[in-house]
Image (cartoon, rainbow, N blue to C red):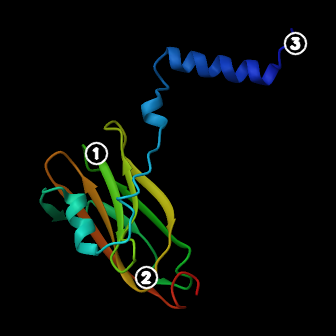
């Protein structure tokens, strides 16, 4: 039986990591919840995200996004924070037909850092919402889209 060296090494490393508890399928899995990312109003999206928790504006979340975006189809965004016990992060675009742009659950042991590219339908406030067990923290910035939004 001929064994492919690369496949053998990859399988051995994965099995070893799984045996040491470094890999668990629940950490690496992604789930698409179509209802969360359906077209809807900004207010309904925020109500669903907050789930009855109070929202507190903070300067302890850093939202880095350009004030002016020449192309609404590719707007870079970075969110970071040293707040403790963040369970979930969401990025919401107020004027988009689908306001919820990103939602991710985090491991408690990690500090928050996320980088992505957003699609903005037009000039809008962009919110970063960080959820803990008791409260949701938020920060917002206004982004002006100069050429028709979404690259149009």
> Counting other residues with Cα less than 10 Å from the Cα at mark 1, is it few (<14), some (14-19), or many (20 or more)?
some
The residues bearing labels 1 and 3 have C-alpha atoms spaced at a distance of: 47 Å
Q: Earlier in the sequence, mark 1 or mark 2?
A: 2
Local crowd at mark 3 within 10 Å, few (<14), some, or many (≥20)?
A: few
- Which of labels 1 and 3 is toward the front? 3
Q: Quadrant of residue 147?
A: bottom right
Q: Report, in whole angstroms, how far the alpha carbon at label 1 lies from the one at label 2.
A: 28 Å
| Foreground disc of the pair 1, 2 | 1
**CB under 8 Å between discs 1 and 2:** no
Label 1 sits on residue: 87
Q: Is residue 14 above or below residue 122?
A: above
- For this orientation, the residue located farthest to the top is 1
Residue corresponding to mark 3: 2
Q: Nearer the viewer, residue 34 or 64?
A: 34
Label at residue 67 = 2
Q: Nearer the viewer, residue 102 or 80?
A: 102
Residue 37 falls in image quadrant: bottom left
Q: Residue furthest bottom?
A: 147
In the displayed structure image, the side of residue 149 where residue 55 appears, left or right: left
Please tell me which of labels 3 and 2 falls first in the chain: 3
Q: Are marks 1 and 3 in contact (CB under 8 Å)?
A: no
Q: Are marks 3 and 2 in contact (CB under 8 Å)?
A: no
Identify whether 33 is placed above or below 78.
above
Q: Secondary structure at mark 3?
A: loop
Q: Is residue 1 above or below residue 24?
A: above
- Residue at the (50%, 61%) spot, across then down: 116
Q: Earlier in the sequence, mark 1 or mark 3?
A: 3
Left or right side of 113 for 6:
right
Rendered location of residue 148, percent (x, y)? 52, 90
Rounded to the nearest angstrom, the CA distance separating label 3 from label 2 is 58 Å
């Amino acid at each position: 039986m001929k064994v492919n060296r690369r496949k053998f090494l990859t399988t051995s490393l994965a099995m070893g990591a799984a045996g040491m508890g470094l890999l668990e399928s629940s950490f690496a899995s992604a789930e698409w919840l179509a209802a969360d990312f359906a077209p809807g109003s900004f207010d309904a999206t925020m109500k669903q995200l907050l789930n009855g928790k109070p929202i507190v504006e903070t300067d302890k979340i850093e939202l880095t996004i350009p004030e002016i975006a020449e192309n609404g189809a590719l707007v870079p965004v970075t969110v970071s924070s040293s707040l403790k016990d963040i369970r979930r992060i969401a990025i919401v675009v107020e004027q988009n037909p689908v306001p919820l742009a990103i939602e991710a659950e985090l491991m408690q042991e990690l500090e928050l850092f996320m980088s992505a590219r957003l699609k903005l339908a037009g000039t809008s406030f962009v919110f970063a919402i960080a959820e803990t067990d008791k409260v949701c923290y938020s920060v917002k910035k206004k982004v002006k889209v100069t050429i028709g939004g979404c690259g149009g």
